[in-house]
Amino acid sequence: MAAALSSSEVAAEGQEPLLSPGEAAAEEEEEAESRDVVETQEHYKSRWRSIWIMYLTMFLSSVGFSIVIMSVWPYLQEIDPTADASFLGWIIASYSIGQMVASPLFGLWSNYRPRREPLVISTAISVAANCLYAYVHVPHSHNKYYMLIARALVGFGAGNVAVVRSYIAGATSLTERTSAMANTSACQAVGFILGPVFQTCFTLIGEEGVTWNLIHLQLNMYTAPVLFGALLGVINIILIFVIFREHRVDDMGRQCKSVNFEGEGTEGEEDGGLDQDTEGNIDHVAVVAINFLFFVILFVFAVFETIATPLTMDMYSWTRKEAVFYNGIILSVVGIESVIVFMVVKMLAKKTGERAILHGGLLIVLVGFFILLPWGKKLPNIQWQEIKNNSIPRTAPTEMLMPFWSLQAMQPPSNHTAEPVGCPVTQSWCLNTPVIYLAQYISSDILIGLGYPVCNVMSYTLYSKILGPKPQGVYMGWLTASGSGARILGPVFVSQIYTHLGPRWAFSLICGVVVVSLLLLEIVYKRLIAFSVRYGRMQEENC
């Protein structure tokens, strides 16, 4: 019998040396420890500083949309008298169109290059677009088209939302993800709320304001908000350069080398575990399902915010000023409610899981729109005066293409001594559709304000977990684009269905869409699990 080879001889022949059971166990333990790189305190602080910069970027993106929304119409009328309400609808929609186009592009860019690049370029585009908006009064003609381009470019710059969410998804573990996504959505919601507040503060400057002839700059209530937004954008760029760093952790919180790595302050990161953890295919059925659900969520909320003004004017005989004022108060309260929900849902998700909360959120939205269905026998007041004056009804489709807050600055012409109120008889459904009581409307607002933020956060959270350690830029871009498309189509849906068929048809169809979404969620429920759970690398209760 041949003599056994020594360990050195075995090693010389390219084979592993024979180890005793104790030595083998010790070596396996050492290998496991080397794979599980412990995050240092310095790395942890740097990672969360970068995530907070992403929160700020999300906040500024939403402020860029809402900070001028109340003043767009009067400013448009001042710089170009040829612009009408239908063109205003295009200006409002141009932001979402720009974001829909840019989101996949910036997402693709962030998959292969350091994320600082698309973040800085997109923010710089927004800064330049805001400056262009401040100068749209200078040309002698076609001013409305310059405003359209400016708002589209602001939306294009806001396509960095996909980069922000993909970074946060890659820089957080599964246990941190829900909380981080909720904070991101909360910052976005706060931006939408504070934008009009900033605009209101700048109205103190007045329409005349101050003119700097040397550079043809007019600093007034219309241009000051966008210049303020540009200043915030410059600050954001500086913070991205100074504080933001590329960080990546796997689903269990271990440091990994990012595909966006450029050798900046991440010396302790390893890439060995990342290749292993990315093995496996993404469940594209689940990806498509979440995209559809997210589209529906944004679509129904766009319908909700768009229909507020015309519905209350038709049902409660409110004047335009009353409708904007009261709805502004109601939706401001809803916005505050949403921020609170974003905070609460983080804790709730740890106990029930994201899928159950998404299911509950959709059910709440369904009940909210079901409540809006007209019941009873009482009919709304009819706007007979519209016929007597032979004028165009105030709820014309072109006007309803705009969300209610874009009508805030639209006041009746000065020669109107009494504004016609009520449901225009030219809308034939006014003659046979029961009134929606104010209690119904307010209850619906509360429920939708509760269900929407829940669905929003859970969609993003589930989506990022389904994608796992794979580069998420393009996927987040498509998700953002689907939301932007929903915000474009929502007002169009309202303008056609509500105007011609009435609230019963409009809200019944919305209920039907939400029911379809709930059925889809039931079908794919078991597939909406984290990538690491799907491939057995983690237990579901840890997610």
Image (tube, rainbow, N blue to C red):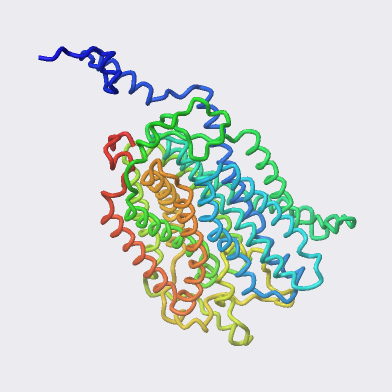
In x, y percent, where is residue 540?
28, 38
Decide if residue 36 is on the left or right side of residue 50.
left
Query: Outermost residue, left direction?
Result: 1
Nearest the viewer among 199 and 163 is 163
| Residue plotted at (57% across, 55% down) | 329
Q: Is residue 385 above or below residue 38?
A: below
Q: In this view, does 364 lie above or below 534?
A: below
Any part of residue 340 in sight: yes
In x, y percent, where is residue 56?
59, 41
Nearest the viewer among 388 and 192 is 192
| Residue plotted at (39% across, 70% down) | 374
Nearest the viewer among 510 and 368 is 510
| Residue plotted at (73% across, 70% down) | 77
Any part of residue 185 in sight: no
Decide if residue 148 is on the left or right side of residue 21.
right
Query: Outermost residue, front direction?
Result: 2
Nearest the viewer among 149 and 489 is 149
| Residue plotted at (56% across, 32% down) | 263
Decide if residue 427 is on the left or right side of residue 283.
right
Rendered-image quadrant of the C terminus: top left
Rendered-image quadrant of the N terminus: top left
Q: In the figure, residue 345 lies in which quadrant?
A: top left
